[in-house]
């Protein structure tokens, strides 16, 4: 069997196939990502895609494919630079669906008449049961299946699935969490995690007012504890311990 056409992907593939603990973390990371940013909610799709990029970049780091500018033992580098290096290897198109539906390779506005897919792409999803690398410059049979639909360049997931079957060297098997169709129970969990009552007692009021009665007593207690901290009755460590007790 020949390689995938990418020595970096080959190294990542060997690493995941030979290190069960890394593969399990990748699987759990996609499950956690689906819980935090379910793409059924249109507002969370960007977060889901970005999270998938980071999961694959972190796996590549674990495999030694990605390194810090000054080497693997360096500290204090820009994570943005690391993600840029990852994107220089391949883009990531992730899905949480079991069906091989349409994949948007590129979005464009207005003059998208001539937009080509040229960058190597790692497709990840339950419909693939893992990850597949496709380089459209060399895997022309897949590139030719892409089509322009006016506002985007798209590719049917079935073409990627068929490619994975005929090119096992480009395929890394692992479990990817399945989206069963429901967005997270709280669509506003992300913004609530930012505008928290302990730090934003004024701005958080709409979220407190909308909270179900069962949750409100807990939130009110945290707000009361924050007031005690601000009055100097509790120090920061006492406040944190008290909040931990409330939310358990």
Image: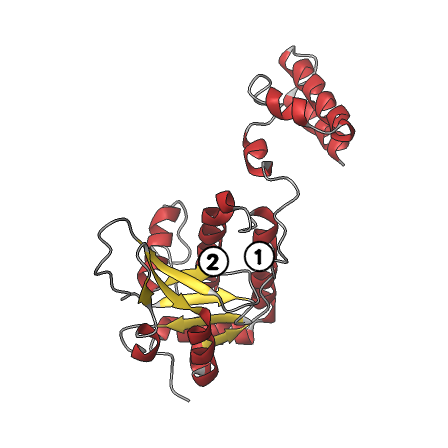
Residue at the spot 75% in from the left edge and 27% down from the top edge: 218
Evaluate whether residue 181 shows in this view: yes
Position of the C terminus by quadrant: top right
Give the residue at mark 1: 29
Residue farthest toward the front in the current orientation of the protein: 150
Question: Mark 2 to mark 1: distance in Å?
Answer: 10 Å
Evaluate whether residue 63 shows in this view: no
Question: x%, y% of residue 67?
Answer: 38, 59
Front residue of 44 and 122: 44
Closest to the camera, between mark 2 and mark 1, is 1
Give the residue at mark 2: 58
Instruction: Describe residue 248's horizontal placement relative to residue 42 as left or right.
Output: right
Question: x%, y% of residue 179?
Answer: 60, 58
Front residue of 151 and 122: 151
Residue at the spot 65% in from the left edge and 10% down from the top edge: 231
Front residue of 76 and 143: 143
Q: Quadrant of residue 207?
A: top right
Instruction: Describe residue 5's horizontal placement relative to residue 37 as left or right.
Output: left
Front residue of 24 and 99: 99
The tag earlier along the polypeptide, 2 or 1, is: 1
Question: x%, y% of residue 167?
Answer: 43, 83
Secondary structure at badge 2 equals helix
Residue at the spot 69% in from the left edge and 14% down from the top edge: 228
Secondary structure at badge 1 equals helix
- Residues at badges 2 and 1 in contact (C-beta under 8 Å)? yes
């Amino acid at each position: 069997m020949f390689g995938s056409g990418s020595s970096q992907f080959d190294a990542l593939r060997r690493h995941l196939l030979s290190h069960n603990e890394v593969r399990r973390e990748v699987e759990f990371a996609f499950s956690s990502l689906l819980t935090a940013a379910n793409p059924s909610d249109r507002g969370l799709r960007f977060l889901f895609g970005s999270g998938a990029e980071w999961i694959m970049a972190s796996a590549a780091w674990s495999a030694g494919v990605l390194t810090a500018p000054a080497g693997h033992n360096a500290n204090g580098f820009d994570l943005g630079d690391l993600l840029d290096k990852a994107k220089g290897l391949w883009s990531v198109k992730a899905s949480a669906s079991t069906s091989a539906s349409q994949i948007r390779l590129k979005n464009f506005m207005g003059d998208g008449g001539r937009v080509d897919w040229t960058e190597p792409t790692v497709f990840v999803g339950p419909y693939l049961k893992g990850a597949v690398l496709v380089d459209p410059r060399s895997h022309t049979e897949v590139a030719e299946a892409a089509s322009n639909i006016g506002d985007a360049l798209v590719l049917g997931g079935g073409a990627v699935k068929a490619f994975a079957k005929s090119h096992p060297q480009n395929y890394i098997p692992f479990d990817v969490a399945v989206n069963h169709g429901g967005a997270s129970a709280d669509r506003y969990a992300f913004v609530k995690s930012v505008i928290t009552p302990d730090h934003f007692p004024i701005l958080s009021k709409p979220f407190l007012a909308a909270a179900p009665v069962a949750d409100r007593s807990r939130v009110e207690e945290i707000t009361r504890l924050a007031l005690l901290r601000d009055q100097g009755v509790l120090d920061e460590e006492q406040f944190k311990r008290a909040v931990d007790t409330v939310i358990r």
